Image: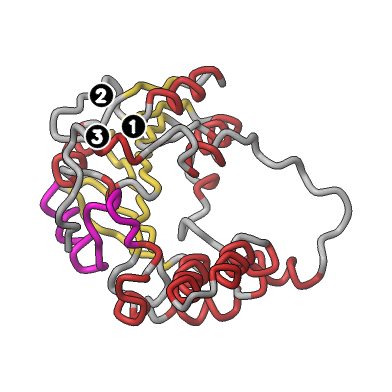
């Protein structure tokens, strides 16, 4: 599925201002370790809240490339685990902020013409593929830069979930006009295959933040903007995230959460 009409390559940058949320929240350093014991309910819920479907820190460190790295927080965290990190970010301000952190980040867009100098053991794209005009060309560029035995990790919204059919144009993860393509597990696998990747696993993320934001749109359209604002605020709080952990676990087991992470290897 694709968004139509859509911004051109030349104008889509207008929809990524300097206060675009991913640029802002990736400027913050990693949170310091919490002092004292966590509440029991959070200790129980935390193992359920896995975003990656694999503990990335358990992959042996090597050369890492993240595309769409924003202001570099994830790269900084991986560097602290012993990785040699590199990034690609289309927004000049976000890329400059990452470089101020001492990170090797180029300014540029991922497409079929992109060339990388290195050969990487891990290539990551967190919520990036849906933003690309040329997703297959971009994945081919990553394939050319993959070292033998490399792993590709990427996340996208899950348009194959029932909630997309339920919320329709109020589904938060549509995010028009910056989300140009909308993937189901089946179409994501097809795109990866076309680009020379073999899908190893699809992991449905255990989070209901997209569902909460979608509910807020219902409130907005019903003429209850304060209710919608309250729902959006609640969906970003730890109480919502941890409190919905059990339900999100069940929904993920049936492939029904709003986001998914795919792991692939060179075909």
State which mark lies toward you, 3 or 2. 3
Q: Is residue 48 left or right of residue 261?
A: right
What residue do we see at 49% from left, 19% from top? Answer: 99
Q: How many marks?
A: 3
Q: Which of marks 1 and 3 is in front?
A: 3
Label 1, label 3: how far apart the Cα atoms are: 16 Å
**Residue 192 among those drawn in magenta:** yes
Image x and y of residue 48, in percent: 59, 69
- Where does label 3 land, which residue? 110
Q: Is residue 87 a member of the stretch shown in magenta?
A: no
Q: Of circles 1 and 2, which is in front? A: 2
Answer with the quarter of the image where residue 149 lies: top left
Mark nearer the N terminus (1 vs 3): 3
Percent x, y of residue 134: 15, 43
Report the residue marked by disc 2. 116
Q: Nearer the viewer, residue 97 or 140?
A: 97
Residue picked out by circle 1: 120
Which quadrant holds the N terminus? bottom left
Q: Do the residues labelled 1 and 2 touch (CB within 8 Å)?
A: yes
Identify the element where label 3 is drawn: loop
């Amino acid at each position: 599925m694709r968004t139509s009409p859509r911004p051109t390559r030349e104008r889509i940058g207008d929809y990524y201002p300097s206060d675009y949320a991913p640029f802002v929240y990736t400027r913050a350093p990693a949170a310091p370790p919490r002092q004292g014991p966590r509440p029991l309910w959070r200790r129980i819920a935390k193992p359920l809240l896995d975003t990656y479907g694999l503990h990335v820190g358990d992959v042996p460190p090597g050369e890492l490339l993240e595309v769409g790295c924003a202001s570099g927080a994830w790269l900084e965290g991986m560097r602290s685990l012993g990785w040699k990190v590199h990034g690609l970010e289309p927004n000049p301000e976000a890329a400059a902020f990452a470089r101020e952190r001492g990170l090797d980040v180029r300014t540029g867009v991922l497409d079929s013409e992109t060339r990388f100098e290195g050969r990487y053991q891990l290539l990551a794209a967190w919520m990036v593929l849906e933003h690309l005009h040329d997703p297959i060309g971009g994945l081919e560029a990553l394939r050319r830069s993959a070292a033998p035995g490399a792993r590709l990790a990427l996340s996208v919204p899950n348009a194959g979930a029932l909630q997309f059919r339920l919320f329709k144009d109020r589904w938060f993860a549509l995010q028009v006009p910056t989300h140009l393509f909308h993937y189901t597990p089946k179409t994501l696998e097809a795109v990866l295959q076309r680009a020379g990747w073999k899908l190893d696993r699809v992991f449905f993320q255990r989070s209901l933040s997209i569902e909460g934001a979608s509910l807020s749109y219902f409130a907005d359209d019903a003429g209850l903007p304060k209710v919608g604002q309250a729902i959006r605020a609640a969906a970003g709080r730890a109480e919502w995230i941890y409190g919905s952990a059990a339900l999100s676990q069940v929904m993920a087991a049936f492939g029904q959460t709003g986001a998914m992470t795919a792991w692939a290897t060179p075909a």
